[in-house]
Amino acid sequence: MNELYGNELRVWDVATRKEVKRIDVGAGGEGILIDPVRPRAYYAVSAGNKLVVIDTKTMTVIKEISGFENPDGMDWFVAK
């Protein structure tokens, strides 16, 4: 679950409706994209002008990509 005005991305278990983990990403964000192939999630940290890559097995930030201006929604496509 994203938080535009917080510093964390919150992970919830849908079946139990319980919070599993809070991941500090440094600023608020808006867009979340789950990689359909690899155990990765991409989170647009809008207030921090960056994108973070999260390992969905360990629920940890594995990479930060800065230099964006207020990133938001994302989409997945396959090049042909």
Image (tube, rainbow, N blue to C red):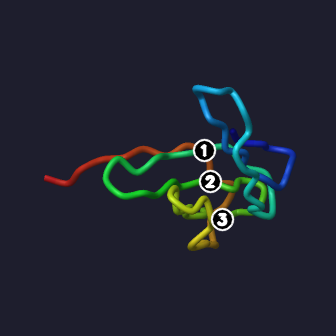
Q: Is residue 68 above or below residue 74?
A: below
Residue 3 in picture, x, y percent from top left:
78, 42
Question: Mark 3 or mark 2, which has the lower sequence index?
Answer: 2
Task: Give the percent coordinates (x, y) of residue 32.
Answer: 57, 45
The image's mark for residue 9 is: none
Write down the quadrant of residue 53 in the picture: bottom right
Q: Residue at x 20, y 54 (%)?
A: 79
Disc ID at residue 50? 3
The kind of residue on which mark 1 rests is Gly
The residue depicted at 62 percent of the width and 35 percent of the height is 13
* Residue that carries the numbered disc 2 in the rendered image: 44
| Amino acid at pointer 3 | Lys
Q: Nearer the viewer, residue 33 or 62?
A: 62
Furthest toward the front, the residue is 16
Comparing 4 with 57, the one in front is: 57
Q: Amino acid at mark 2?
A: Ala
Q: Are marks 2 and 1 in contact (CB under 8 Å)?
A: yes
Instruction: Please report the residue visible at 51 percent of the width from the left and 54 percent of the height from the top.
Output: 41
Which class describes the residues within 10 Å of circle 3: few (<14), some (14-19), or many (20+)? many
Say which residue label 1 marks: 31
